[in-house]
Structures are given as C-alpha cells and as structure tokens.
Amino acid sequence: AQSVTQLGSHVSVSEGALVLLRCNYSSSVPPYLFWYVQYPNQGLQLLLKYTSAATLVKGINGFEAEFKKSETSFHLTKPSAHMSDAAEYFCAVRGTTSGSRLTFGEGTQLTVNP
Amino acid sequence: GEEVAQTPKHLVRGEGQKAKLYCAPIKGHSYVFWYQQVLKNEFKFLISFQNENVFDETGMPKERFSAKCLPNSPCSLEIQATKLEDSAVYFCASSQGDSPLEKAFFGQGTRLTVV
C-alpha cells in the first residue's frame, strides 16, 4: 500500500524566509506524488505534481519540490515566504492504476510571521 | 464550467437524522471521488465513481453511508442515522480521465455538523 508522511504538523517562518515542508512516501513502485494547498474554508488546490519526467518540479506561486528516490522524499520548498502562503499543505500519493484514489498525508499548517 | 459544485455548504443534523450531500462534477469528467476531512486534516477516501458506476468503495463505512452518481443528476452522498463522529467536511473531486496523473479538481466542501 502507498502512503505519505508529513513531518511537522505546524511550521512557522518569517516573511521572506525559506519555506520547507517535508514529505516522505512509501511505495513499492514509482509513485505519483502531489502537493495540494488548502486555504481556510476552501477546497484543495493543486500546487504541483511529480510525473517522473523531472526530479525537480516547479509549481504555482513560486513553490517547487524535489523527488529524491534515495531518501523517498518529496519536500516542498519556496525560497521566500509571503504572508499569503499561510495555509494548510497536503502531500499526496496516487496509485498507478486507472482512476486510483489520492492518499493524503496528515497536513502541515504553515504560519508566516511578519 | 471548471468548478466542482458542492451543496449545501453547511448542513446541521440532529443525531439520528439523515444527511444528504450533493456534488456536481465538472462537465466531461468521468471520475468522481468523495473524501471526508475530520478536524482540518486527515483526508479519508470514501468512494469513487467512473461515470455512474461505483469504481472503488473500499473506504465507505459498511453501514449508514451510501452514494450514487446517476446520469444527468448531481452525485450524492447520503448518511442514514447520523452520529456525532460523522461531523466533518466532505469533499468531492472530479477528474477527466483515468490516468493517475490527471488533475483532480476539488469542490469547496460541505461542512456537516451533527448535534
């Protein structure tokens, strides 16, 4: 079975600082990995996805993630945090069969301090 | 349009009452997924449909929960005899095709409060 683990349920950074949100996956086959963001009282918005075409994936809003097979990780980063980045972030893995579900991590709440 | 529409936004039910949630997927999308989010985290998969057929129901509680996706109607998720523990936000998502790389579009959710 595939799963993802997000290390740190809460991360707090200063505006302008580096954002690093950690995600490790468990999968017996090359996984399809995703990062989603959830703003208060909203649904999920896709930030980026790993498709095996490139290990460094660039997403929206200046976020990127690097797939590291040796570390089974897919950490999300942003060089400079903005106040508007404050939200809940979810890492997710999807099976490789047709129509398969997303399995989410526990989420990381990002706080950006002025 | 490019939006998954979920209704109602909020639903309050007394314990033991029935709750019915609706989801209109994006037109042309073949797959519909239901997730339950408790306490602002832990997205739990419930069920998925391929068109009107149940595709994966391994996450559905065996009792009290049922779901349908009928042609020309919104999909629905029904909870019979609600319990306090059913209080959660229920999200619906749809995707166009069957590739695992297909982007899943999420609705804004229905917040169910059981009192």
Image (cartoon, rainbow, N blue to C red):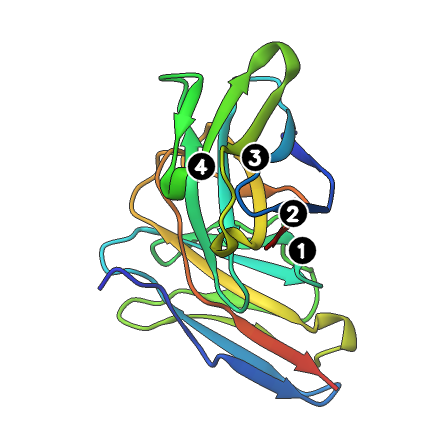
Locate residue A74, reporting x and y percent.
56, 26
Which residue occupies 65% across, 33% down? A4
Q: Are discs 1 and 2 less than 8 Å apart at CB? A: yes
Discs 2, 3: same chain: yes
**Tag nearer the camera, 3 or 4:** 3
Circle number at residue B41: 1
Viewport quadrant of the C terminus of chain A = bottom right
Subunit ID for the residue under disc 1 = B
Subunit ID for the residue under disc 3 = A
**Tag nearer the camera, 4 or 1:** 4
Q: Which residue is the site of mark 2?
A: A107
Q: Quick one: label 4, few (<14), some, or many (20+) residues within 10 Å?
A: many
A41 lies left or right of A107? left
Q: Quick one: label 3, few (<14), some, or many (20+) residues within 10 Å?
A: some
Q: Which residue is the site of mark 4?
A: A63
SS for dot 4: loop
Compare marks 2 and 4 and give the one earlier in the sequence.
4
Which residue occupies 64% across, 44% down? A13
Circle number at residue A18: 3
